[in-house]
Structures are given as C-alpha cells and as structure tokens.
Image: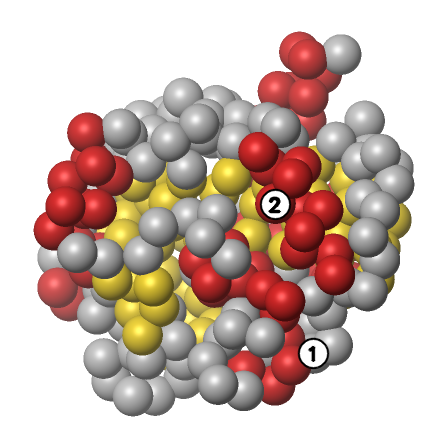
C-alpha cells in the first residue's frame, strides 16, 4: 500500500502526516505537488492541514481549482480513499466531494487546543478500529471550523451515517460548551455516502504518539491500513 500527501502552496501539516505514515507506521508515502495531474498509483490520498493559497477568498476556495484536484475527484469517484484534515476538509467541501460548508468560528477567533470527540460511526475505512461512542482526545487549530449545512442535507447525513465525529465533553456529551467553533450539532467530521472520503477538523497526525500528549489518532491510521490490507 502507498499513501500520497498532496502539498498545496500554504500547506503546513504535510510533513506531520508524512512523519506518522513513514516513521511511525513504516508505510510507503510520497508527496504529490498540487500541480501534478498524476496520483502516482497511491492507495490513499491525504489532503493535509494548513492555509492553502493563504485562505484567500475563503479556505479551500482556490485550492479546489488546483490541477491535482481533478485527479483526486476521479480517484474518489472510483472508490479510492481520501482523507482531508482541517484545511483538507475545507478543500473537500469546496470541491463538492463532501456536502456542506465551513464558516468562521462562532467566536471569530482562531482556536488551538485539545478537544474531545465522540466516534459516531465505526463502519468506515477510517474508524473501523474505534468503538462506537468512544471518546477520544485530539487537537484542533483553525479559524474556520464552523460546519454548516441545510436541514435536508443534515437529515441525509444522519440517515446515511455520514456523521463520523462530534465534539463532546470528556464524558461523551455533545454539549454547546464542548463545541469549540459553533459547528452544527457539534459536527467535527463527516464522510460521503460511500464512506471512502472523510473530512475532519481535528488533527489525528498531531496525536499519534504519546509524547505529543495523546495517541488517540493512531487508531485512525491503523484503521486505514487495516482496510487497505483487506483490499489487497
């Protein structure tokens, strides 16, 4: 199996993802430049966090026009695994690979801290090693993480099991106080109906080693690896 990490102008978490995949899990991984039209035969595409194109217009709005995104969209439509983290989630929304949109945090401030998440769906390639309802601890770092969609879309997300993570307190309660950005119904991560595309605002690559204060992101990468192993 091989991972590909797309590097946009302004990406700043690409090396973090590379480190986890290459040095923690010892899996083949390579960078894919945003002007490349070829995904080089990778099995999982990672859109990392950062500030692609300086977040001009709005986060992800310019990155969706990068040459590589045509290949990413085709890859996803063919069933390939795609995970977008933070700015990568925003790019997936702008590119139409996931429904909804991101708004400014309700506080109108950049938020950088650890939060608790409740795992809402374990039947995805990204979460199959978590327990349903498990509470995990991951860091966030964003100014535009306030997820929004209309009522019809929200209803479909619920019916199809597309809500993957919710912000919660340490006891698993998805309360307004546990919501760091005003996101609709405490949504922290969603997938597409086919379950092969995941977008999440928290950073699993920043909590995949105990020395970082949490290793709760390990199970996400292990879930992807397990799923890809099962496909080979």
Who's the residue at 35% across and 50% down the image? Answer: 99
| Image x and y of residue 167, in percent | 28, 54
| Image x and y of residue 228, in percent | 68, 21
Q: Quadrant of the C terminus?
A: top right
Who's the residue at 82% across and 52% down the image? Answer: 37
- Image vertical order of residue 12 relative to residue 213, above or below: below
Q: Quadrant of the N terminus?
A: top right
| Image x and y of residue 31, in percent | 84, 55
Q: Secondary structure at mark 2?
A: helix
Q: Secondary structure at mark 1?
A: loop
Q: Pick whichever, 61 or 119, lies toward us.
A: 61
Numbered disc total: 2
Tell me the residue that label 2 is attached to.
Answer: 73
Q: Quadrant of residue 74?
A: top right
- Pointers 2 and 1 in contact (CB under 8 A)? no
- Image vertical order of residue 87 relative to residue 174, above or below: below
Horizontally, residue 118 falls left or right of residue 31, namely left
Tell me the residue that label 1 is attached to.
Answer: 10
Earlier-in-chain disc, 2 versus 1: 1
- In the drawing, what numbered circle is on residue 25? none
Who's the residue at 31% across and 57% down the image? Answer: 100
| Image x and y of residue 33, in percent | 83, 62
């Amino acid at each position: 199996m091989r991972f590909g990490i797309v590097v946009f102008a302004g990406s700043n978490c690409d090396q973090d993802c590379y480190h986890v995949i290459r040095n923690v899990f010892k899996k083949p991984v390579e960078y894919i430049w945003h002007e490349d039209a070829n995904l080089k035969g990778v099995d999982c595409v990672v859109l990392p966090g950062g500030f692609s194109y300086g977040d001009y217009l709005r986060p992800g709005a310019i990155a969706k026009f990068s040459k590589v995104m045509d290949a990413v969209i085709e890859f996803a439509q063919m069933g390939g695994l795609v995970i977008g983290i933070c700015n990568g989630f925003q790019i997936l929304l702008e590119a139409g690979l996931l429904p909804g949109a991101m708004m400014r945090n309700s506080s109108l401030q950049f938020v950088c801290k650890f939060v608790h998440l409740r795992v809402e769906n374990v039947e995805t390639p990204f979460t199959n090693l978590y327990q349903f309802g498990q509470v995990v601890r991951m860091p966030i770092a964003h100014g535009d993480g306030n997820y929004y969609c209309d009522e019809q879309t929200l209803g479909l997300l619920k019916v199809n099991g597309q809500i993957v993570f919710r912000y919660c307190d340490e006891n698993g309660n998805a309360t307004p106080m546990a919501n760091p950005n005003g996101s609709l119904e405490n949504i922290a991560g969603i997938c597409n109906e086919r379950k092969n595309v995941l977008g999440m605002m928290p950073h699993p690559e920043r909590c995949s080693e105990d020395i970082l204060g949490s290793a709760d992101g390990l199970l996400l990468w292990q879930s992807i690896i397990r799923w890809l192993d099962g496909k080979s």
